[in-house]
Image (cartoon, helix red, strand yellow):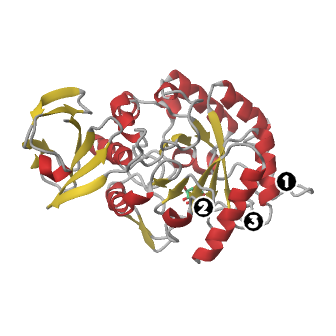
């Protein structure tokens, strides 16, 4: 998978974002070391491409006298251009963050009214990706469309290729208008926490969502994702294990595996959120499995659909470019279950078909009419079936 050969977002974007692990403490050392780790760990060779600096990179006290954004002098003393050069020197791309209002979620300067100036500045630094948030902006859809379109146009006018990541959390149906606004991916939910279940956030008087609930959003929006524009289920929480800046006590290894499996099946962008400088073997195994990543990056670009539900178990199917079908057998319940997969459930005939367990990397006996697999609580078994 070569980084250079693909137009932006022809397959779901892959990379790393600073927010989940580092929050407002992100600095240039973290970004440099993360880019280095993306290469040395083999993640780059697997297709991870963007290193994205999220909120809080700019000086909180405001713009300079010319109205330009200023990198925080303590955390980014060498400036963003030098950082971009470092990241590009590793054969990777660099992303930055702003907000369609006066202030970002973390109360740093936003880009409202400065779209052209900010886009030109980012282009001059060599930025390749913008995540554009929606804190402190009006709730209605028309304003969101207008503000995102304005930034999409400004990015285009720089003449530099930007990947434009919309982050208004799904409330104004960005899956409907995101592409037209110039977006290549759009968040479908609020922030996903490092948790299987939803978490009560007292400060906001609402629930923050866990991985289990995101799976339903992926099912509802499957038809809207495809080459050039993707439903973004939010950054990965794989590997955080409760140690990130975001909330959540972490998940079990099986739950992280389901999270990765379903983000891949749904064609969600895969933006890693954990500290890559200390990549643990179990986390590396989830992030670097080429057969699993191939499901996400399949050139046909068709998000999986939920084909069947029975009790807590679900069967999802995703057509692949080589004519095969990727299948997820998912158990969202708290007891182990025997899941019966019928060829007809996923639109296939009863003729013998090749079947492979993708996570196990094992060919199975030919699949004809029915297959029974034991699926543990919160586990996902991924299969590739070719007839
Ligand atoms: C919002 C976004 C997050 C992150 C933070 C930064 O909550 O949804 O992904 O960018 O802002 O403040």
Q: Are marks 1 and 2 in contact (CB under 8 Å)?
A: no
Which of these two is toward me, 299 or 220? Answer: 299
Front of the two marks 1 and 2 = 2
Q: Residue furthest top?
A: 40
Q: Image point 70% across, 28% down: which residue?
A: 86
Tag 1, which secondary structure?
loop
Which of these two is toward me, 27 or 137? Answer: 137
Does the beta carbon at disc 3 come under 8 Å from ligand 1? no
Q: Position of residue 74 (x, y in %)?
A: 76, 43
Tag 3, which secondary structure?
loop
Q: Between marks 3 and 2, how big is the CA–CA gap?
A: 19 Å
Quadrant of the image containing the C terminus: top left
Does the beta carbon at disc 2 come under 8 Å from ligand 1? no
Q: Position of residue 10 (x, y in %)?
A: 52, 42
First reached walking from the N terminus: tag 1 or tag 2? 1
Drawn side of residue 112 relative to residue 383, left or right = right
Indicate whether 306 appears above or below 122: below
Determine which quarter of the picture holds residue 333. Answer: bottom left
Q: Are marks 3 and 2 in contact (CB under 8 Å)?
A: no
Q: Position of residue 297 (x, y in %)?
A: 42, 38
On the rendering, which quadrant does ligand 1 occupy? bottom right
Tag 2, which secondary structure?
loop
First reached walking from the N terminus: tag 3 or tag 2? 3
Q: Image point 74% across, 43% down: which residue?
A: 160
Residue 68, labelled with which disc?
Answer: 1
Which residue corresponds to mark 3?
A: 112
Which residue corresponds to mark 2?
A: 180
Indicate whether 101 appears above or below 241: below
Q: Image point 59% across, 78% down: which residue?
A: 140
**One can see residue 77 in this view:** no
């Amino acid at each position: 998978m070569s980084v250079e050969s693909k137009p932006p977002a022809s397959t779901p974007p892959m990379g790393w974002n600073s927010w989940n692990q580092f929050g407002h403490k992100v600095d240039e050392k973290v970004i440099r070391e993360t880019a280095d780790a993306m290469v040395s760990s083999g993640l780059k060779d697997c297709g991870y491409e963007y290193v994205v600096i999220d909120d809080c990179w700019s000086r909180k006290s405001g713009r300079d006298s010319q109205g330009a954004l200023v990198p925080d002098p303590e955390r980014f003393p060498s400036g963003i251009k030098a950082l971009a050069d470092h990241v590009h020197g590793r054969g990777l791309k660099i992303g930055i963050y702003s907000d369609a209002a006066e202030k970002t979620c973390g109360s740093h300067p936003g880009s409202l009214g400065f779209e052209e100036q900010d886009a030109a500045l980012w282009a001059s630094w060599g930025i390749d990706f913008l995540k554009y948030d929606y804190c402190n902006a009006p709730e209605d859809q028309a304003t969101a469309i207008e503000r995102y379109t304005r930034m999409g146009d400004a990015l285009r006018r720089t003449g530099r290729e930007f990947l434009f990541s919309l982050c208004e959390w799904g409330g104004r149906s960005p899956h409907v208008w995101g592409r037209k606004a110039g977006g290549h991916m759009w968040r479908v939910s609020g922030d996903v926490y490092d948790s299987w279940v939803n978490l009560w956030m007292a400060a906001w008087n609402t629930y923050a969502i866990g991985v289990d609930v995101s799976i339903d959003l992926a099912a509802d929006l499957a038809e809207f994702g495809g080459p050039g524009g993707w439903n973004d289920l939010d950054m990965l929480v794989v590997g955080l294990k409760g140690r990130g800046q975001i909330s959540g006590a972490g998940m079990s290894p099986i739950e992280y595996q389901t999270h990765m499996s379903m983000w891949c099946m749904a064609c969600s962008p895969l933006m890693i959120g954990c500290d890559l400088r200390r990549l643990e073997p179990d986390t590396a195994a989830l992030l670097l499995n080429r057969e699993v990543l191939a499901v996400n990056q399949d050139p046909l670009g068709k998000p999986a659909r939920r084909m069947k539900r029975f009790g807590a178990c679900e069967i999802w199917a995703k057509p692949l470019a080589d004519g095969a079908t990727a299948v997820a057998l998912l158990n969202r319940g708290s007891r182990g279950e025997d899941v019966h997969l019928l060829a007809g459930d996923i639109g296939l005939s009863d003729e013998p078909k090749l079947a492979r367990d993708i996570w196990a990397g094992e060919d199975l006996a030919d699949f004809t009419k029915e297959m029974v697999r034991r699926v543990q609580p919160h586990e996902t078994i991924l299969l590739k079936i070719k007839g």
